[in-house]
Structures are given as structure tokens and as C-alpha cells.
Image (cartoon, helix red, strand yellow):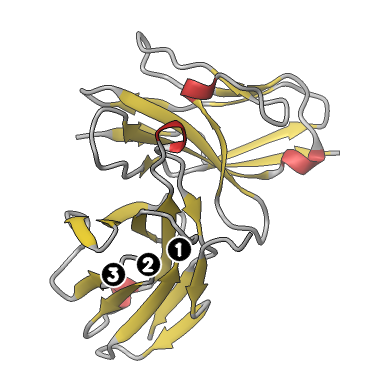
Amino acid sequence: AQRVTQPEKLLSVFKGAPVELKCNYSYSGSPELFWYVQYSRQRLQLLLRHISRESIKGFTADLNKGETSFHLKKPFAQEEDSAMYYCALSDSGGSNYKLTFGKGTLLTVNP
Amino acid sequence: GAGVSQSPRYKVAKRGQDVALRCDPISGHVSLFWYQQALGQGPEFLTYFQNEAQLDKSGLPSDRFFAERPEGSVSTLKIQRTQQEDSAVYLCASSPRRVHLKNIQYFGAGTRLSVL
């Protein structure tokens, strides 16, 4: 069975500090990993996906298959980054693209 | 353009009542997903449609839950004889399934169901 673990429920940093949101996964197939974000009073939206290898809003995430991790990083956090972040996994080789989500990490960036 | 639309946004039901939750996906999106998000948890998969075909309903928690998408666009999630444990936010997502966009799901704002 596939599983996504986000060990930190809450993470609080100061503006300008580096931030890392941890995500570990368990999956026997070929996974595709995502980070979704939910800002206050907004809907869940895609932040980035590992196959795009993009930096979105200064965030990056590298898939480490050896450690089965997909940690989200930003070198200098901004107050507007405060939100709920969900790591998610999908089967890239199948025909059903359902997402398996972690429980989420609430990031608070203090001024 | 318009995103995924869900209605109602909030629903309060008495235990034992039947409820119907509606999802209007983004026009032209082939795939449609329903998720259940309990308080303090991440969304959990309920069911998946490709056009009008329900290809996976493995996440539906009981036979009280039923989903349909008869014309391959609007979908309805029905919960019969609601129980308190059904209280959650129900999220709908759609996906275009074009190869370079596959796996990207666009979420609605959700329906918050409270069963008293």
C-alpha cells in the first residue's frame, strides 16, 4: 500500500529563515510526487511536482528514491508562505491517478 | 476560466438523513475525483471517474456512499443515512488527462458536511 508521511504537524520559522518541510513516502511502484498548498480561505492548489523540476515561489523539492523522500525547501521564507502544505503521491505508470496525501504541515512564517 | 465548482459549500444534516453533493468540473476535463478530508487529516481518495465510467470506487467507506457522473461532466456524491463519522469536507478534483498535464488535479473549494 502507498503511504505518505509528513512528520511535522506544525512548523514555525521567522521571515528570512530557511524552511524545510519533510515528506517521506512508501510505494512499491513508480511514484510521482507532488506538493499541494492551501492558503487561508483558499482551495487546495498544486505547488510543484517532481517531474517538472521547477522552482515555484522560491520552493524546490528533490525526489530522493534512496531515502524515499521528497522534502520541500525554501532558502528564505516569506510571511505569505504561511499555509498548509500537503505532500502527495500518485502512480505514474498506471491509469488511475488518484492521489495519496500526507496529513499536512501547517507552516507559519513570523515577521 | 472557471474552476471546479462544488455545491453546497456547507451542509448540515441530521443523523439518518440522505445528502447529495454536487461537483461541476472544469469544462472538458476527463477525469474526476472525490476525496474526503476529516478534521486535521489530509484528503483521502473516495472514487474516480473517467468520463462517465466509474473506474475506481475502492475508497468509498461503506455502501451508504454512492457517486455518479451520468453524462461525463457533473458528478454527484450521495450519502445515505448519514452518520456522525461522515462529518468532513468533501473535495472534488478534475484533471485534463492530456499527456503533459496528466496527474495534475484541480480542486474545488469543497463541501463541509456536518452531521448532528
Disc on res. B25: 1
Instruction: Determine which residue is flagged by label 2.
Output: B73
Q: Which residue ends up furthest to the top in the rendered image?
A: A66
Q: Secondary structure at mark 2?
A: loop
Q: Chain of mark 2?
A: B
Establish if B90 lies above or below B80: above
Q: Quadrant of residue B115?
A: bottom left
Q: CA distance from mark 1 to mark 2?
A: 7 Å
Q: Is residue A10 left or right of residue B35?
A: right
Q: Which residue ends up furthest to the left in the rendered image?
A: B63
Instruction: Determine which residue is flagged by label 3.
Output: B69
Q: Label 2 sits on what residue type?
A: Ser
Q: Quadrant of residue B64?
A: bottom left
Disc on res. A85: none
Q: Label 1 sits on what residue type?
A: Pro
On the question of residue B41 being in view, the answer is no
Q: Position of residue B29 (x, y in %)?
A: 42, 55
Residue at (21%, 73%) from the top-left corner? Answer: B66
Instruction: Confirm or deny contact between disc 1 and disc 3 (CB under 8 A).
Output: no
Residue at (40%, 38%) from the top-left corner? Answer: B103
Q: CA distance from mark 3 to mark 2?
A: 6 Å
The crowd level at tag 1 (other Cα within 10 Å; few <14, some 14-19, many 20+) is many
Q: Secondary structure at mark 3?
A: loop
Q: Chain of mark 1?
A: B
For the image, the number of numbered tags is 3
Instruction: Confirm or deny contact between disc 1 and disc 2 (CB under 8 A).
Output: yes
